[in-house]
Amino acid sequence: MLPLGGRTLVVMRPREQAGSLCSRIEAAGGRALRFPVIAVGPALDPAPLQAIIGRLDEFDLAFFVSPNAVDHALRAILPQRTWPATLRVATVGKGSQRVMHGWGFADVIAPEDGFDSEAVIALPEFAPDAVRGRKVLIFRGDGGRELLAETLRERGASVEYVTCYRRYCPDADPAPLLEPIARGAVDGLLLTSSEGVRNLESMLGADGLAALRGVTVFATHPRIVAQAHAAGFAKVVETPAGDDGLMQALESHFA
């Protein structure tokens, strides 16, 4: 029997980032039920991204906070100009690194382990001696953690942000999730964002969320674990990062 045979797992990633994980769940014998709790779209104001395109040569390092940042930024930039040969690129984890490879970037700075700002800050390329006096451009969504920029500034770098996409709570019918939950036909909820936990609360309301609390949550970071506990989930399994980490944890849990 396949390791996830007979298991139904709810993948709550944004729709654009759910495909590879869903395919792996299905290849392992499971059923992947897609219920995105974050929607992604272009920035409401495209002017800042457009304005930065002509200034890329001013920067020493460009950092992309997520696969969405990679796609939305490069989709705007590369039809208009070539990427400066002197502008190094970095990102937060293996998933974003693969997306950058798909855009033709071979030399991408990214952590081998971890997928958060703490892991990036620990890289030698972000050490004080490496970034002092450098100009860093951060491509991101509308808001997010400030730790990376604050640390780089403390280490002597100058930092600019450009918003290239937005995240928002989907306006989705909860029935496709609540109906199999009511039948006891869901074995796990896969949450990969603290913001997604908060959106789930908003999407379902108090009664809907209460119906989910008996289902095991698989969360890919301690912050997400804490947010899930705060939302009232009693069974929360912390998993390693990325598709590999999630699959390893799922197969181990259901073995």
Image (spheres, rainbow, N blue to C red):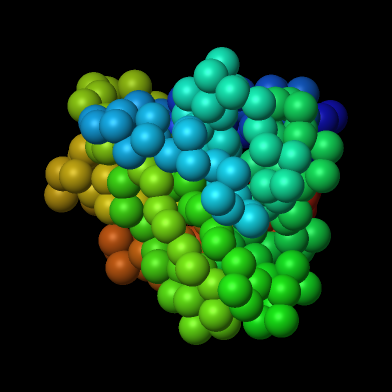
Residue at 49% from the left image edge and 41% from the top image edge: 55
Residue at 75% from the left image edge and 40% from the top image edge: 85
**Front one among 234 and 148:** 148
The spot of residue 184 in percent (x, y) is: 43, 35
The spot of residue 135 in percent (x, y) is: 55, 62
What is the tally of numbered marks visible in this picture?
A: 0
| Residue 23 falls in image quadrant | top right
**Front one among 111 and 6:** 111
Left or right side of 140 for 100: right
Left or right side of 252 for 139: left
Indicate the quadrant containing the N terminus: top left, top right, bottom left or bottom right.
top right
The spot of residue 107 in percent (x, y) is: 82, 44
Specify the farthest residue to the top. Answer: 79
**Front one among 139 and 211:** 139
Q: Is residue 181 visible?
A: no
Q: Is residue 46 visible?
A: yes
Residue at 24% from the left image edge and 48% from the top image edge: 201
On screen, residue 79 above or below 251: above
On screen, residue 53 above or below 220: above
The spot of residue 10 in percent (x, y) is: 49, 34
**Front one among 106 and 197:** 106
Residue at 19% from the left image edge and 44% from the top image edge: 202
Left or right side of 246 for 161: left
